[in-house]
């Protein structure tokens, strides 16, 4: 528990200080945000705001985690290292995308094919390593389960590794892009991510307290390294919370693809390593709605040959064009996120109660 508190607190402080430094450095170098011309006109004033702030989130949370482990004298676990690999790897893909946009002064960074290849390679490595027998613990548990779960593994069936890897790749790509789509208003993706990572901190603490290794029972959890995963979740929660200080409206910095791809990938990683792949759809319900709005908009546009279901997708832009103030949209979407998170945690706890 001490490591969890240290990781969250250190990441928070590091991000508060580091983001302020990043704003100054990025502004001096002219690394500013490019704004879509077809978007809400109110966003045009944001042109030139420093971007790639996700670097501060990623670096602060990784440093916070390792400093907490160093202070408490505990060694990192395989699950935590795998998650950090996924987190930093996707953040690196996002960084390349952001840097190309700024360097070439265009809205298009990495080509979609190159970005997809980068995400896929990182996700495949993560998926294969998480399922390899070589990373089993003393109870012969691999970091990832051999089935697709809602809240816990079931013994009814297992899936071939190649099927599970394909599913993990799809989950990582979908979640990272979902958070990326939600990063369109000041503080929206940051605040929502803070709540969901906070939820995973609680989930991991609970799974550790009810671990089959500590308390064997019908309702225990077969999850490897839940306590160390809680340390990582706390570190990312603290980093997002600190970044929100500078990213809240009016934003002084944006996280960019560097932050959104990293955070989305980490959420998918937590879902895989905690055996809660389908529960993620509830905890991250806002991100699901944002993605569905884009899918529905594109599908409706093609079927009706030019008509639009929403004024603009993703969904937050639709409400802006209806006349809602940006801050109003953000706060209401945060409330929606809070409801999804509360519902997800409620379902998680209710399943445990039903099994006891």
Image (spheres, grey):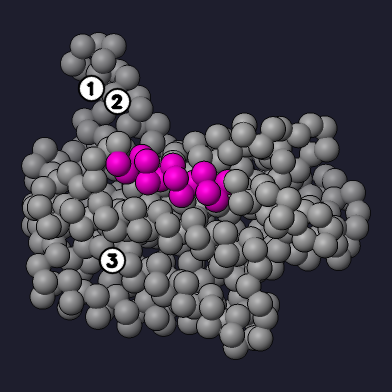
Q: Which comes sooner in the sequence, label 3 or label 1? A: 3
Residue 282, horizontal then vertical, whole percent? 56, 42
Q: Which comes sooner in the sequence, label 3 or label 2? A: 3
- Residue 273 lies left or right of residue 178; in this view the side is right
Q: Secondary structure at mark 3?
A: loop
> Quick one: label 3, few (<14), some, or many (20+) residues within 10 Å?
many
Residue 243 in view of the camera: no
Quadrant position of residue 239: bottom left
Q: Which comes sooner in the sequence, label 2 or label 1? A: 2
Judging by the rendered image, the residue that carries numbered circle 1 is 308
Q: Which residues are magenta?
A: 114-127
Residue at (37% x, 58% y) in the render = 91
In front of the other: 53 or 85: 85
Task: Tell me the CA gap for discs 3 and 2.
Answer: 29 Å
Q: Is residue 29 above or below residue 278?
A: below
> Quick one: label 2, few (<14), some, or many (20+) residues within 10 Å?
many
Quadrant position of residue 307: top left
- Residue 234 lies left or right of residue 356; in this view the side is left
Judging by the rendered image, the residue that carries numbered circle 3 is 53
Task: Tell me the CA gap for discs 2 and 1.
Answer: 6 Å
Residue at (26% x, 15% y) in the render = 302
Instruction: Give the label, 3 or 2, closer to the camera.
Output: 3
Judging by the rendered image, the residue that carries numbered circle 2 is 297
Query: How many numbered dots are placed on residues in this image?
Result: 3
Q: Secondary structure at mark 1?
A: loop
Residue 297, horizontal then vertical, whole percent? 29, 25
Residue at (33% x, 83% y) in the render = 17
**Is residue 120 one of those drawn in magenta?**
yes
Q: Is residue 237 above or below residue 350?
A: below
In front of the other: 47 or 173: 173
């Amino acid at each position: 528990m001490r490591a969890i508190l240290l990781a969250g607190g250190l990441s928070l402080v590091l991000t508060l200080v580091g983001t302020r430094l990043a704003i100054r450095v990025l502004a001096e170098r002219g690394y500013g945000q490019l704004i879509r011309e077809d978007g809400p006109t109110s966003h045009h004033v944001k042109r030139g705001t420093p971007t790639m702030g996700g670097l501060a989130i990623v670096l602060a949370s990784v440093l916070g985690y390792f400093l907490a482990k160093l202070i408490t004298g505990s060694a990192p676990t395989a699950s935590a290292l795998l998650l950090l690999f996924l987190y930093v790897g996707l953040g690196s893909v996002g960084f390349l995308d952001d840097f190309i946009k700024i360097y070439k002064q265009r809205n298009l960074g990495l080509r979609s094919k190159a970005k997809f290849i980068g995400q896929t390679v990182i996700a495949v490595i993560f998926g294969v390593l998480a399922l390899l027998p070589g990373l089993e613990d003393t109870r012969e548990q691999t970091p990832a389960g051999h089935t697709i779960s809602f809240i816990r593994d079931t013994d009814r069936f297992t899936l071939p590794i190649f099927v599970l890897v394909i599913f993990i790749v799809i989950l990582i790509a979908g979640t990272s892009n979902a958070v990326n789509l939600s990063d369109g208003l000041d503080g929206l993706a940051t605040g929502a991510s803070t709540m969901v990572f906070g939820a995973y901190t609680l989930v991991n603490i609970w799974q550790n307290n009810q671990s089959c290794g500590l308390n064997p029972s019908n309702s225990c959890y077969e999850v490897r390294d839940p306590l160390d995963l809680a340390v990582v979740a706390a570190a990312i929660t603290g980093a997002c919370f600190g970044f929100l200080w500078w990213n809240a409206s009016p934003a002084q910095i944006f996280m960019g693809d560097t932050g959104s791809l990293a955070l989305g990938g980490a959420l998918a990683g937590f879902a895989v390593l905690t055996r809660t792949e389908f529960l993620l759809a509830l905890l991250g319900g806002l991100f699901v709605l944002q993605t569905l709005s884009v899918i529905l908009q594109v599908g409706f546009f093609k079927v009706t040959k030019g008509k639009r279901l929403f004024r603009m997708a993703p969904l937050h832009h639709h409400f802006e064009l209806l006349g809602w103030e940006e801050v109003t949209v953000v706060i209401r979407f945060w409330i929606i996120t809070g409801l999804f998170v509360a519902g997800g945690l409620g379902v998680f706890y209710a399943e445990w109660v039903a099994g006891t």
